[in-house]
Amino acid sequence: MDQRVLEAVNSDNVAELHQIFSSSWQSLGQGEQKALSANFVKAALASPEFLAKAFAGTENDNVNQALETFKACLSQLPSTVENMADNTIRLKLFDLLVELQDFIEAANILSGYRFDEDESSPYYSTPDVQADIYVKIAECFLHEDEIVEADAFVIKAGAAVQTLSMMNTMKDDQENNFADEHISIILRYKSVYARILDKNRKFLSAASRYYDLSALGSQTDIIESDDLLEFLGRAATCAILAPSSSQRQRILGMVYSDERLGELDSLSHFATHSSILSKMYREQVIRRDQDLIQFEDSLADHQKAIMGDGLTIFQRALIEHNMVAASQIYSSIYFTALGQLLGLSTEKTEKIASKMILDGSLKAFIDQVDGILCFDGQEDSHAKKLIEWDGAITSFCMQMNSVVDQVRQNV
């Protein structure tokens, strides 16, 4: 059967190979199947045109048969294949499938790439190779919004990158070019990680990661200036969408202080970001206008999701912002008036305010009897006034008793 496989490879006969690895080899023992698979992999690599023709993409049936054949073959391999031929074929198949934009299959094929920590093993890979493989897989899963799978592989990539960084710190000063040699894979890892945080709606962490990437222009020339500006725009987007907190205010301040912020206006998908972010950082009340509509239209699908309370992510972020902005204007406000300002019912306004008070993002207390929200430590001021009032009453009573005693003595 080995000769039959070799002839099919040399003649680019994908249909024949598909027939062999789908039915004919079922009569073979497990050991024979493994040997046949290894021989097929080596033959496919030895042929200068077989892979390119098998995945030419002009005949879908041909491509499907080729993919099914290789998947069957790669699932039945011996523990070691000469010259790591199985890893080599996975990389080549990955590139071909990416060209065909079959990202899920590309990721699945490459996820079977074999690593070994033993340096004497033919499958030993350095941390930079491991990181590169894991990042490629994560990028493909992320492209198809398979966030759980992408997250799993970016975590593996992170471990490899950390090992790479530790090795770099152990280098002598004379060999300090190690980081430069691997900066590309580290940047790809950071970019994918930021995008996964963004997709998982962890906007505060994503904003911080994006901003760090946008600020790398002074450290490396690998990233184009347009890409740096794109990262800055994404940082602004995520900072605007993040829940209200002191950490969010810090990120808003970093982006607001960046001298490139105004350049975002020249990009259609970031045209309103600088205006909205500036108002948020300065804690100004933001009212519904065309800028907000344009901003919402520029958001990605996962950023437009409707939350459990019936509000979109941006609506919730805007309401929380305006709640905090109102605290800079008023010492207290009726929930009916605040609801009108926020465009919400009185009940929903009070519910959101309660949650913000509980998580510490709003310094206030609620007077439920009168339906009033008191801002910025007004509770302490109110208690202080009560104490002062009690003291005044006590002093008055003492003075009154003194007057009464004097009158009695004179009588």
Image: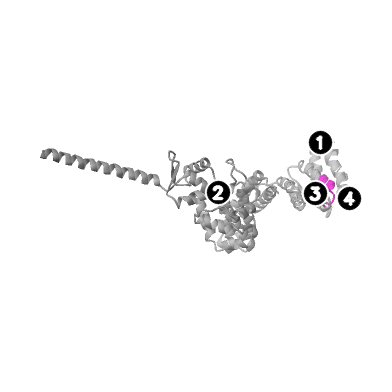
- Callout 3 secondary element: helix
**Residue depth check, mark 3 versus mark 4: number of the one nearer the observer:** 4
- Callout 4 secondary element: loop
Which residue type carries mark 3?
Answer: Lys
For label 3, count other residues whose C-alpha is less than 10 Å away and answer few (under 14), some (14-19) or many (20+).
some
Instruction: Tell whether label 2 touches label 4 (CB within 8 Å).
Output: no
- Callout 1 secondary element: loop
The magenta-colored residue range is 55-66
The residue under the point 52% across, 61% down is 257
In magenta segment, residue 6: no
Percent x, y of residue 103: 73, 49
The answer to which of 56 and 372 lies nearer the viewer is 372
For label 1, count other residues whose C-alpha is less than 10 Å away and answer few (under 14), some (14-19) or many (20+).
few
Q: Quadrant of residue 176?
A: bottom right
The residue under the point 88% across, 44% down is 4
Q: Which residue is the site of mark 2? A: 317
Disc on res. 29: 1
Disc on res. 11: 4
Q: Quadrant of the C terminus?
A: top left
Which circle's residue, 4 or 2, is located before the other in the chain?
Answer: 4
**Residue depth check, mark 1 versus mark 2: number of the one nearer the observer:** 2
Q: CA distance from mark 1 to mark 2?
A: 62 Å
For label 2, count other residues whose C-alpha is less than 10 Å away and answer few (under 14), some (14-19) or many (20+).
some
In magenta segment, residue 59: yes
Q: CA distance from mark 3 to mark 1?
A: 20 Å
Q: Which residue is the site of mark 3? A: 42
Q: CA distance from mark 4 to mark 2?
A: 62 Å
